[in-house]
């Protein structure tokens, strides 16, 4: 048996069709647009996150922490490998990567760790010269901490694996130097130079990376950069990248090295995305706000028109809280229909948007609008609508409940 | 032989009693002393008529007796329970259970059919199954001569028909007390007699106390008790 209050609410509401349709359409729009904007902004944010995790991993360890003030004094001021940031003193680079890597692998959330030797170089092709950075990697380790395997667009990772003097060159850099797979180029650093072959060309979509990073096998990089031991940094991938800040803090404590999670490394872009998401959320919440104002208006109107019905109901034994519920139910009906229709609208528009061609290259590469499908967006949209509309409805509902039947029948209810 | 017992089932059972009711209406300069110490009682199975000139306070008294309004002074007992200083929830419950009220001017919830209007108090009380409610509502509408119009909306009924539906609705929960403010005011002679006969029959059959305000001397005369009222007091 449906509650009599719900029944009454339904009749009251449908007697005011135009006002109801107004509140309903605002609710549908509010819910729908909320979903669409969340789906698109978080779509781009997630894609960006995936891109940068695929390049730099979740955590990077570099620079040993100088332990005491005394050892700082002992090291002396003239050492160029000695730095001082945020009141903590660092010694550049990682001296014993193997020991550190073994310690890192003890962490449950760690999926892979790769030691990288990095240095500034000059590249010389037959055509022209460009500045670049080489990254000396062990391929087996590095594919576990990056998406290198999926980023190769020309040639193959197999070719790189099998050629000790092979290089992985970024798409933008390769274009500038007019290099194709199999071409050779000269890399020079600190007076030394070596000839390597382009084994494959990769593209991350992150332009800064694609125009500067060249990957070499570690032995090759070591002899080029004259760095027979140690590493510049360790790159770590995690099973759950969201937990990177906590893991980084633990790692820093245990390993006495500077440890940076990706959230800190990319905080500028992440802040941009968050600002974007919040600003669209606020913009779109205007529709929900209008929906709640429309609902307020509709209910206030119905309360005025139905004071006599309220008196009749109260005379028949309906309590104050029944009256409150009758009016809240009306908001509930609009919300229920609005939430379902809004979710459908949101899903439909999200799908349509995902079909829109939109080539982007710069901080990630895509040729379509990126969307995410996430129930939490739907829940968030519905929750926002429910809270705003219900709060707005509470005022007329309580007003209706406060009406005294005696005042109404005498015609003195205001 | 037996000493008077407070047990609700025993005795002459005043369904309704009030003592020394005072009610002022309006504010400030416009404040009027409408009821000036009215006392009244209604016994089960009896029909009472309150008569008097327009503006003497009949409706005001009826709202107080129907627990729709609170007196400034005085006491009201419903079925032997003092209601005048109870809280809103208790008074509301008493309205639903013990009192049927027919308003003077507005009768129905117009978005609902006659049948739904009559079922409305039953739904709130929730004592009957939905099927039994429906059946009872049909029977009540039959008895006010509207058996053929049960599915008409309030808006599709004439004023007199609305009034008869309102009477059927007031009887829905078999209240001990039926209060009606000029229930035959809008009806032609045939229909007022029909309604009046219905009210009196119910009072006799179900042992209900019926209190009605009327301008119709013929009707007043046919009631068991007539209480003339003037200027806020019974005379
Ligand atoms: N809100 C009010 N303010 C002041 N006086 C009122 C108000 N409502 C009713 N009255 C007065 O109370 C008196 C009794 O009214 P009412 O009980 O409706 O009379 P009746 O039903 O006997 O015609 C009338 O004189 C009326 O003018
Ligand atoms: Mg009157």
Image (spheres, rainbow, N blue to C red):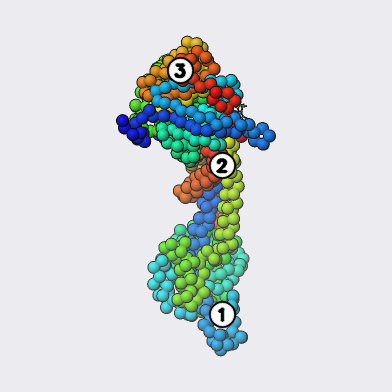
Q: How many marks?
A: 3
| Residue at (50% x, 30% y) in the render | B39
Q: Is residue B58 above or below residue A69?
A: above
Q: Are marks 1 and 2 on the same chain?
A: yes
Q: Are marks 1 and 2 in contact (CB under 8 Å)?
A: no
| Residue at (47% x, 10% y) in the render | B190
Q: Which residue is mark 1?
A: A89
Indicate the chain on which mark 2 is placed: A
| CA neighbours of label 3 inside 10 A, class few (<14), some (14 to 19), many (20+) | some
Q: Which residue is mark 2?
A: A395
Task: Where is residue A228? Give x, y as percent.
Answer: 48, 80
Task: Where is residue B202? Give x, y as percent.
Answer: 39, 20
Indicate the chain on which mark 1 is placed: A
Q: Residue A139 versus residue B189: which sits nearer the camera?
A: B189
How far apart are labels 1 and 2 at the CA level? 60 Å
- From the image, state whether disc 1 or disc 2 is nearer to you: 2
Residue A66, labelled with which disc? none
- From the image, state whether disc 3 or disc 2 is nearer to you: 3
Question: Could you tell me which secondary element the residue under label 1 belongs to?
Answer: strand
Q: Residue furthest left?
A: B1
| Residue at (53% x, 81% y) in the render | A66
Residue B223, labelled with which disc? 3
């Amino acid at each position: 048996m449906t509650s009599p209050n719900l029944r009454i609410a339904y009749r009251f509401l449908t007697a005011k069709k135009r006002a109801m349709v107004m509140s309903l359409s605002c609710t549908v729009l509010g819910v729908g647009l909320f979903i669409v904007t969340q789906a698109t902004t978080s779509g781009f944010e997630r894609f960006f996150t995936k891109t940068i995790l695929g390049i730099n991993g979740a955590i990077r360890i570099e620079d040993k922490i100088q332990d005491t003030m005394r050892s700082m004094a002992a090291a002396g001021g003239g050492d160029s490998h000695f730095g001082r940031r945020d009141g903590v003193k660092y010694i550049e680079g990682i001296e014993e990567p193997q020991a550190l890597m073994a310690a890192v692998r003890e962490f449950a959330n760690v999926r892979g760790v790769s030691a990288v030797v990095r240095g500034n170089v000059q590249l010389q092709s037959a055509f022209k010269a460009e500045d670049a950075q080489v990254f000396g990697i062990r391929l087996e380790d590095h594919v576990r901490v990056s998406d290198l395997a999926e980023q190769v667009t020309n040639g193959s990772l197999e070719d790189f694996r099998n050629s000790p003097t092979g290089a992985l060159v970024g798409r933008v850099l390769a274009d500038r130097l007019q290099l194709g797979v199999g071409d050779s180029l000269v890399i020079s650093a600190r007076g030394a130079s070596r000839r390597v072959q382009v084994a494959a060309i990769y593209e991350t979509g992150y332009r800064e990376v694609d125009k500067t990073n060249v990957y070499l096998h570690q032995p090759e990089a070591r002899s080029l950069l004259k760095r027979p031991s140690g590493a510049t940094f360790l790159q770590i991938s995690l099973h759950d990248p969201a937990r990177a800040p906590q893991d980084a803090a633990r790692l820093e404590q245990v390993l006495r090295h500077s440890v940076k999670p990706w959230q800190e490394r990319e905080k500028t872009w992440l802040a941009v995305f968050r600002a974007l998401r919040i600003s669209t959320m606020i913009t779109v919440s205007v529709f929900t706000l209008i929906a709640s104002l429309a609902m307020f208006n509709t209910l206030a109107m119905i309360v005025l028109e139905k004071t006599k019905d309220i008196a009749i109901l109260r005379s028949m034994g309906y309590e104050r809280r029944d009256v409150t519920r009758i009016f809240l139910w009306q908001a509930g009906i609009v919300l229920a229909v609005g939430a379902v229709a809004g979710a459908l609208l949101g899903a439909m528009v999200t799908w349509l948007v995902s079909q829109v061609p939109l080539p982007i290259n710069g901080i990630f590469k895509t040729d379509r609008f990126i969307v995410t499908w996430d129930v939490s967006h739907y829940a968030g949209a519905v929750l926002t609508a429910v809270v705003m509309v219900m709060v707005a409805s509470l005022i007329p509902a309580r007003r209706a409940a406060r009406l005294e039947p005696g005042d109404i029948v005498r015609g003195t209810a205001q | 032989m037996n000493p008077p017992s407070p047990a609700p089932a025993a005795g002459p059972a005043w369904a309704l009693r009030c003592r020394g009711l005072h009610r002022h209406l309006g504010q400030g300069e416009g404040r009027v002393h409408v009821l000036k110490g009215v006392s009244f009682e209604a016994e089960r199975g009896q029909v009472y008529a309150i008569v008097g000139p327009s503006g003497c306070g009949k409706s005001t008294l009826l709202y107080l007796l129907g627990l729709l309004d609170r007196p400034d002074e005085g006491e009201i007992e419903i079925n032997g329970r003092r209601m005048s200083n109870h809280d809103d929830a208790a008074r509301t419950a008493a309205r639903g259970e013990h009192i049927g009220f027919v308003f003077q001017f507005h009768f129905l919830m117009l978005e609902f059919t006659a049948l739904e209007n009559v079922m409305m108090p039953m739904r709130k009380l929730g004592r009957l199954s939905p099927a039994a409610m429906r059946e009872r509502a049909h029977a009540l509408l039959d008895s006010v001569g509207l058996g053929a119009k049960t599915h008409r909306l309030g808006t599709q009924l004439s004023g007199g028909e609305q009034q008869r539906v309102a009477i059927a609705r007031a009887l829905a929960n078999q209240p001990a007390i039926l209060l009606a403010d000029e229930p035959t005011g809008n009806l032609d002679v045939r229909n007022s007699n029909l309604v009046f006969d219905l009210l009196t029959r119910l009072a006799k059959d179900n042992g209900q106390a019926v209190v009605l305000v009327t301008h119709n001397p013929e009707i007043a005369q046919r009631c068991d008790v007539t209480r003339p009222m003037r200027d806020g007091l019974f005379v």
